[in-house]
Amino acid sequence: MSMFEDPFDPRSLLARCSCGGDHRAADHARLTAQAVPSPAGEEAQWNRVVDAAVLRATFPVDAQRRRFLKTVGSATALAAISSVFPLAAAREAFAQGGAPEKKDLKVGFIPITCATPIIMAHPMGFYSKQGLNVEVVKTAGWAVIRDKSLAKEYDAAHMLSPMPLAISLGIGSNPVPWTMPAIENINGQAITLAIKHKDKRNPKDWKGFRFAVPFDYSMHNYLLRYYVAEHGLDPDKDISIRSVPPPEMVANLRADNIDGYLGPDPFNQRAVYDGIGFIHLLTRELWDGHPCCAFTVSKEFASQNPNAYRALLKAIIDATAYASKAENRKEIAKAIAPQNYLNQPETVLEQILTGTYADGLGAVKKDPNRIDFDPFPWNQFAVWILSQMKRWGQLKADIDYAKVAAEVYLATDTAGMMKEMGLTPPDPSKKSIVVMGKPFDAAKPDEYVKSFAIRRS
Amino acid sequence: MPSLGKSLGVRAALLSLLIFAAIVALWQIAAQPVAGSGPAVDPEYAKLVGAAAATGAKSAMPTPADIGATIWKHLADPFYVRGSNDKGIGIQLAYSLGRVLLGFALAALVAVPLGFVIGMSPLVYRALDPFIQILKPVSPLAWMPLALYTIKDSAISSIFVIFICSVWPMLINTAFGVASVRREWLNVARTLEVGPLRTAFRVILPAAAPTIMTGMRISIGIAWLVIVAAEMLVGGTGIGYFVWNEWNNLSIANIVTAILLIGLVGLLLDQALARLARLVTYPE
């Protein structure tokens, strides 16, 4: 409960977790999750949190602050700081949750089902519920969404979950601190092959195949590489993988420019709908519960507009929670099918979201977990992604995996927000990752990379 | 011989109609859905896929009748707005036209004066020639990543791309037009002791105007070609975005509609500049 101790007490330490609590940043979510403030003392407690934040900003060095407080006394210090900083106003703003600094926001998205929570929050009113006027802008490709986000044309954007890591590390762009407070979807991708390959279901027969993935820094790329490598094919030598924007995948498959793709929906199901391809496997068969797309903001936006950021994140978590319930999926399919959003036949979206789908070879399959929605940005996900960047030579330098993961994947923020909204955040340390039967230990990423026979590093 | 000219016109129009009818007929025949060779599928599966896939075939090309219906649907309601990503085709065309005209106007503002200087001074001409020769053949879209990176605004970037692609023909034609003004006319001006500024405006400009207008006509054609590609890349608004959005939905009928309208607008732009060119042409 030290988050709520008196910051004007010269004995207290403020420079541990960024929340002011007496714990490490990594433990923040779990520990504060239990710290349910008593209703009576709640206001006083939040006031102290605000005071602590202001005081910490004034005296970043803990020793200085304590010396100052000892010398002048806490009452004088309070008065002195109040005279230059409107503490009362800050307390009040925080107590009300604070009006968003910016109400008219632009959020970019790529028209794929991964972006469902970001998109549906518009027609279904999740943004307006938080007092935001959000415009969701359809964008042509990942490179464009990255550049428009970096150019601050978008306040927040739908990205592939490896992208904020790549942007923060400066791989494939200038390094800009980028954060990912929420995952959009888990699972929900598939390997689609052209109909003519319907008898080549064993990846060992795929030598010389031309595959498409949406982007170099995508789960799709890493999962496809992992899959073929497990079957003994070198993804850089035995097959070719090119980066193709998702909407163009079906057209390319039809034109016989590619043999298949590991791509996002609706374009797997769309290939089936148009009789061009069949679904070889769903990515959940490789790694059940893998992350895919993400909701991202720049660190700058989050720190300059804390209230707008909180409201936006709340809307996204709210929408994600709604989307994760199977009974809402048909309604969602209807909401996101029009031209303004995904611009797809409703039946295609319904098959993807409900998991009762045509496989392209004449069978109807049922898999209710074909796509699911779970906002929690597990740091283990980030470490796995970084390990694959390393494995395939995208990441050359040695990095502190855990540190980068914690800086970009804001598990703490999300947990706090989930708690505020009456949801139960999971224990951030408890996440097991198993990809194609092989467990991954997030504490030993380098050993994991070295355990693969086919790798570039 | 007006009668022959008229009959030639009528015959040409008839031939055009015949060609059009032949294309439509061939298309109609070619686009007939082919029955799939695959096995008949069960009704539950058929409900989940498109009509063609249910019979084991790929979805077919739309017929001219489908296209006609789609065109009519768009022309009946060209200016609707149903959210920021769904606007009528008239609005999309207006966005594209706005970008093209703005980029084109900026290019004219730069290219005509600069072309004048280049055309009048052999020194400047020689000095700038290598730059022009290297930059001219660069595909305008190659500028896009650079523009997005440096300008950091996608709307201005697409206008910049229009600017950079329409500046060269105007620049070169202006320089050429100015440089090839007849020596006698300049000599006459000099004999009459006309000042240099006055010479530029009263002798050189009118003499070079037809060549400059030809450059402008080439430029606007290129600008209109490029805007579609630029908008497909950047997205947001414009006819190029419309094409991309319908490509997302594999809706060939909508794309063909857009192609026809793009062609029509391009024709109108070209005709407008041709008319302007006729205005400044002088008989010798």
Image: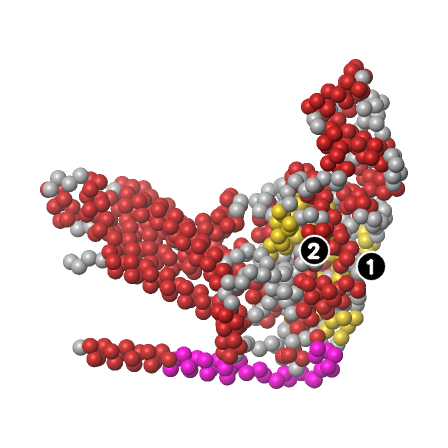
**Residue at the extreme top:** A71
Residue that badge 1 annotates: A437
Which label is found at residue A335?
Answer: none
Please check the rendered image and state whether residue B24 is part of the magenta-colored stretch, yes or no. Answer: yes
* Total number of numbered discs in the rendering: 2
Magenta range is: B18-47
Q: Residue A193 lies in magenta, yes or no?
A: no
Label 2: which residue?
A: A125
Q: Secondary structure at mark 2?
A: loop
- Tag 2 or tag 1, which sits nearer the N-term? 2
Q: Residues within 10 Å of mark 2 (few under 14, many from 20)?
A: some
Q: Does any portion of residue A341 appear in the rendered image?
A: yes
A375 relative position to B1: left or right: right
Q: Measuring 58% from the left and 56% from the top, which residue is drawn there? A: B84
Residue in the picture at 76% in, 67% down: A354
Q: Quadrant of residue A212?
A: bottom right
Q: Main secondary structure of the magenta part?
A: helix
In-front residue for pair A391/A224: A224
Residue A82 image point, x, y percent: 73, 24
Say which of marks 1 and 2 sits in front: 2
Where residue B14 appears, x then y in whole percent? Answer: 33, 81
The residue that appears at 75% across and 34% down in the rendered structure is A92
